[in-house]
Image (cartoon, helix red, strand yellow):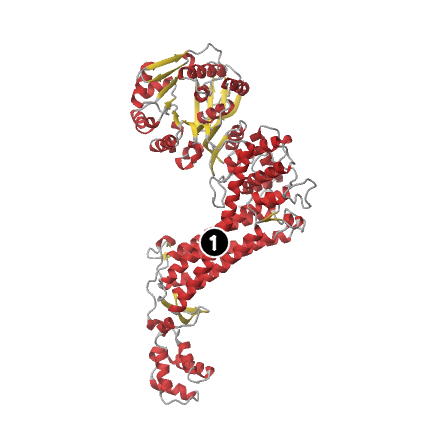
Amino acid sequence: MTQEYSTPDPEAARQAPLRDREDLSIYWDNHLRVAFEQSAPHDLPAMVEASLAHVTMLRETGALTEKRADLLLGGLLKLWRRWGDEEPGEDWRPRITSFPFEGSVEDPYYYLEQQLAAACGISTTDLDVQLARSRNDLDAGVFRMVLRRGILDLAELLLQSVRDLEAVAERTVNALLIGHTHRRPAQPTTIAHVLSGLAEALLSQADELLSVYDEMNVSPLGSAAFTGTDISIDAQRVADLLGFSSSFTASYEAVAGAEHFMRLAGLHARIASTGARWARVLQEWMNLGWVRMPDEFTQGSSIMPQKKNPVVLEHLVSMTGAANGEANAVFTTIAAGWYEDSNNATTDVQKHLWSSTERMIRFVRLIDGLTLEIEPAALPSDEDIVRSGATTTAVAEALATQAVPWRSAHDVVGTLFRQGDPTTWESDQVEAALAEAGIKDDGGLRDLVLSSGCDPRRILEREQPGSPGRQAMSVALEHAARRERALAAQFQERRGAVDAARERLLTTATELAGVSTEGCVLSVIGNTNLDVIVHCTQTFPPAGTEQIVPEIEMRLGGSAAIAAQRGAQLGLATRLTAKVGDDPSGRMVRALAEADGLELDLITAQSADSGLTVAAEDQGCERSFLSSLGAMGTFSPDDVRAEAFQAKYVLFSGYFLLPGLQGAAAASLLRASRTSGATSVVDTGHPDGGWTDRIRAELFEHVLPHTDIVLPNESELLGLTGVEDVEDAARNLAARTGALVVAKLGAEGGLVCTGEEVHRAAAPVVTPLDTTGAGDSFNAVFLWALSQDWDIADALRQAVSVASDLVATEPHERDTHLRALRALRD
C-alpha cells in the first residue's frame, strides 16, 4: 500500500499570535506593557515621594505659586495614601504589587501625570509637576531611592546573620571535626572556627554594602535631562527632603552614571558566591552526619522513604547562578549603552537589580535560618580524626621544633602514613623511618612522633590568633561582634535619616496643602466588580436564538463600589476597600472608580479574574442578576488596612458575595470599626438560595451584634426577621440587635426604626429609567445627610427623595445631580 503525502497549504498554516491583548499594538503589548507591569509597583510610590519634594521646593523658591503648588501637593498626597508605605521603616518591597496597564499611557512617568491630574481635578495639560525636571533625573532619583531601601534591608539581614553565626560559634567552640582541603581530610578544626570565618566574610560584604549605599545615596534630582535648568531651583533642598546625604556634583554623571548599579550587582553576586561555598560545606557535614539535618530544610525522596535530602543547600547554589546571571546582565546591558544613554545603562538594568535584591534577601534569610539550626550530631571521634590523617601536620611540626629540618620531618611522616594511620604506628616503624631519613635519635624523637599525632584536641589549646583555640576564638568572636555593632549603628543611622526625611516631607506637604490627616467621613468595605447592564429585558432568549436589545452598558458595579462612588460624588471624603482581579475587567473597575477621586484601596488578586455581574433590567421593573465572585471570593480580613476603619462611618456592603468576610471574619471587621470610634453600618444584600435558619443565625450571632446601623431593603428585612409586616419586622430587628434599622421600600419610600418608634418617608412618583444601584445610592445619601448633622427623619426623607430622582435620571447625568446636592451642606 502506497502512502500519499500532501503538500501543506501555506495559507492554511496557523499564524502564531504576535500579541496577547488585541487592544494594544505589537510593540506596546510585547514591551511597554511588560515594562510597565514590572516597574510601576517600585517606581510609582517613589515618584510620588520625589514629586512631593520637588513641588515643595518649587513653592519655596517661587517657581510655582503657592496656590498652584498646594493643589499639586494635595493630589500627590492622595496618591501617596493610595500607593505609599503605611509606616516609616517599611521594607523595600512595594505595598501595591501590580498596577493596571490600560494602554492609555506608555509608562509610569505618564501614568503618574494621568493619576495626579485626576486626583487634583484638573487636566494633564494643566500640570506643573515636571517643571524644571526631566524624566531622566526623576528616574535616576527614583532608582536610587528604591535600591537604597533594598540595601538597608539586605544589610540588616547580613548583620543579623553575623550575630547568629557568633551565637552558634560560642556554643560549638569544642565541636571538633575534620577540616578539608581539595575535599581531602587536612587538619582538625571546630564548627566555631569555620563559622567565625564565615562571619568575617559577611562583615566584609556588609562593609562594602555600606560604601555602595553611600554612593547610591546621592541625589541626581535637579540635573534635568543632564545639563540642569535655567529655572532657579534648589537641588540640595530636594536632596534634604528625600533623605539623600548630598546632591550631585556633576549633572551628566548624575543622570547617565551607572557605577552604583554595577557595584551593587557585583556585590550581590559576591554575597551569593560566598554563601554557595558555605552551602557545599554544610551539605557535606550533614551527609557525614556531623551536624543535624533539620527536617524543615529537607525534602523526601520519591522512591526511598528512608531518605531526607537537604535540597535547600542545592537551591542556594542554584540561586547563586541566578545572581551571577543578573550581575552579568547588568554589566552587559550597561556596556551596550552610550555613556550619555540613560536608557540601556540605567532604566533597563532596574529589573535585574530588583530581581537580584529580592533574591539576595531570600538567599540570606535561608543562610541565617540554616545557621540557627546548626547543631552537632555524630561528630567524628578523636580516633576517627587521627585515622583520617588530619593530625599528621602536628607530628611534622613537633619534629621541626626539635631541630629536624621541615622537609625531612615531612618525609618521615609521609613514610609512616603510607604504612598506616597514626593509630597503627609502632616504635620500630618510627625508628626505621627516622633512620631512613638520616636522623639520629636516642628515643626522644620516636616518643615525640608516637605521642604528638594522637591528640587532635591539642588544637583547642592553640593560642595563635585566628586559630581554633578556645581563647583565640573568644578574641575573634568579640572582634566580629564589635565590627557588627559598629556597622549596624551606621546602617541604623542611615535608615533613620531616610525615615525621618520622609516623615518631615509628608508633614510639610500636608501642612502646605492644608490636607486633613484624619480619616475619611465614609469608608466602604465590600463587593466591587464590573456591571454589565442589559436594558429592556429580564429573560434570555430560547437556546440557539438571539435577541437584539436597545443597549448593553458597562459601569462600576457592586453595592460597596456604587455606595462609595455616590458618597464621593456628594462630596464626602470617601474610601473604598475591595478586591479585584488582575484582568481587563479589574483594570476597568479601577479606572471607573478613580474617575470620581475616591481614596482607593483595591487589592489585586494575582492570576485571578475580577467579579462580574450581569444585570437584566426591564424598564420600570425589578432587576435580576447573574454574578461571578472572582477575586471577591478570596477577600479576607487580612486584606483590609487599618486606614479603612479611620472614618466617621464604616459601611460593610455585599456580605453574601464575600465568603471570606462572613461569620466571625465579619465580626472582626465590625469590632475593629467600633474600636476605632466609627459608626458601623451593614447592608447584607440578599443571600443566594434565600433566607435559611442557618443564615439568620449566622447574622444574629456574628454580624448584627456589632452593627450600629443596618440598611436592608424590604425583602431582606422580612426574610431576615421572618415577620410579614415591614414595620413589625423593623421593630423586631431593632429590639433584637439594638441597631438603627433603615429600610428601603422601593416605590413605597423608606422607614427608619429607633426602638419602638417608626418614621416613614413616602417616595415621589417617578418614571423609572434605570433602578440599578438605587439602594446603594440611598445608603450613601442617608449617611451623607447624617454626616451633615441632619436628624434621622430628615435624613430618611432626603435619601428616599434622591434615590427616587436617580432612578428617573439617565445614568450619565447622575454625577451632576449628586454634585448639586453639595450646596445643601450649608
- Residue at position x 30%, y 20% in the image: 735
- 409 with respect to 38 (left or right): left
Query: How many numbered marks appear?
Result: 1
| Place of residue 372 in the rendered image (x, y in percent of width and height, measured from the top left) | 38, 56
Amino acid type at image mark 1: Ala
* Residue nearest the viewer, comparing 315 with 238: 238
Note whether residue 29 is visible.
Answer: no
Note whether residue 234 is visible.
Answer: yes
Element class at badge 1: helix
* Residue nearest the viewer, comparing 276 with 223: 223
| Place of residue 224 in the rendered image (x, y in percent of width and height, measured from the top left) | 66, 43
In the rendered image of this protein, does residue 637 appear above or below residue 683?
Answer: below
| Place of residue 680 in the rendered image (x, y in percent of width and height, measured from the top left) | 38, 27
* Residue nearest the viewer, comparing 229 with 690: 229
What is the residue that sits farthest to the right in this orientation? 230
Q: Which residue is mark 1?
A: 489
In the rendered image of this protein, does residue 749 appear above or below residue 202?
Answer: above
